Each structure stands twice: as structure tokens, then as C-alpha cells.
Image: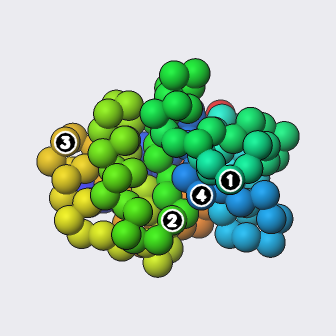
């Protein structure tokens, strides 16, 4: 299946997104994307060890801790590439369906590891942009969350 088809199916089937690096600063891209996806009906699970809450939600220090309370479908990464390998290992451990590396986040070795473990891998793309693209292209089949 082509990546665009995988993205479309993933965005339609996923319910919970763990946003790694979600900032409490409203001007940061992670805050904007998470806020938008929440308004689109996804459950957002903030992952950031330096904050207690964001978007009115409790923040978790890591994916392993968050997954004890929330089944996470997509791990959306807003961290520098050097942090990606560990995050991929955590995504595999919690049985996430996908690892999504936001714009500018590129790590080919970690992507291969996630892919080999059976996860859908999206790299260097914005989840908000992709959601809007697919939602807008399917007017006959409305996206309801």
C-alpha cells in the first residue's frame, strides 16, 4: 500500500495521539497541531517531562508511562532527530500503530526499525496538513471522529 493510502487509513482509524514534545507555548508548532487535532476529535496525550499540564490535559514524562493509562495509536514526534531512536523503541514497546515524525524530523535508521517492527512510518510531514488534505479530498465521505 502506498504511503498516502497508509496515511489516509491511519488518520481515519486512529483515536489517540501521543504528542511527544508538546509545548505549553501556544506559538509553538506542537501546540498548534495538537490543539487542531484535538478539535478534530482525536484524543491527545501530551508527552513532555518538563510540564505538568497542557491544553488542560495532564502531561506524561514518557510514552511508557502514558500508555499505562491510554492506548496510543500514533506517536507524533516533535523532538530533534537524535531523540527519535529511543522514541521508536518506546512506540514499539507500547504497540503503537504508527510513528509520525513532524516536518524537519528525519531519522532513517529509526524509521527502518519502526517499519521492520510493523509500524506505519511517516517522516518529515505535518499531521495537521495531512489531516486537512485527506478530509478536504473526501467531501462525499465526511470525516467524523
Q: Is residue 107 above or below residue 45?
A: below
Q: Which mark is residue 117?
A: 3
Comes first in the chain, label 3 or label 4: 4
Q: Which residue is mark 1?
A: 50
Give the camera-side residue of 15 and 58: 58
Q: CA distance from mark 1 to mark 3?
A: 29 Å
Q: Residue at x 55, y 32 (%)?
A: 66
Assess disc 4: are there few (<14), some (14-19) or many (≥20) residues with their C-alpha within 10 Å of its C-alpha: many
User: Residue lying furthest front in this view?
Assistant: 50
Numbered disc 1: secondary structure: loop
Comes first in the chain, label 1 or label 2: 1
Assess disc 2: are there few (<14), some (14-19) or many (≥20) residues with their C-alpha within 10 Å of its C-alpha: some
Q: Quadrant of residue 25?
A: bottom right
User: Residue lying furthest left in this view?
Assistant: 116
Give the camera-side residue of 140 and 12: 12
Numbered disc 3: secondary structure: loop
Q: Which residue is mark 4?
A: 21
Tag 2 and tag 4, C-beta contact below 8 Å? yes
Q: CA distance from mark 2 to mark 4?
A: 6 Å
Q: Which residue is mark 2?
A: 79
Q: Kindly report which numbered mark, 1 or 2, lies closer to the viewer in this rendering.
A: 1
Amino acid at each position: 500500500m502506498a504511503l498516502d493510502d497508509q496515511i489516509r487509513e491511519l488518520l481515519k482509524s486512529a483515536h489517540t495521539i501521543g504528542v511527544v514534545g508538546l509545548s505549553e507555548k501556544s506559538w509553538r508548532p506542537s501546540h498548534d497541531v495538537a490543539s487542531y487535532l484535538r478539535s478534530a476529535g482525536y484524543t491527545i496525550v501530551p508527552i513532555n517531562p518538563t510540564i505538568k499540564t497542557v491544553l488542560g490535559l495532564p502531561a506524561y514524562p514518557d510514552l511508557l508511562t502514558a500508555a499505562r493509562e491510554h492506548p496510543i495509536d500514533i506517536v507524533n514526534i516533535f523532538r530533534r532527530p537524535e531523540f527519535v531512536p529511543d522514541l521508536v523503541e518506546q512506540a514499539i514497546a507500547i504497540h503503537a500503530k504508527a510513528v509520525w515524525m513532524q516536518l524537519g524530523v528525519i531519522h532513517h535508521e529509526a524509521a527502518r526499525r519502526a517499519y521492520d517492527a510493523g509500524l506505519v512510518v511517516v517522516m518529515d510531514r505535518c499531521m495537521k496538513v495531512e489531516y486537512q488534505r485527506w478530509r478536504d479530498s473526501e467531501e462525499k465521505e465526511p470525516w467524523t471522529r
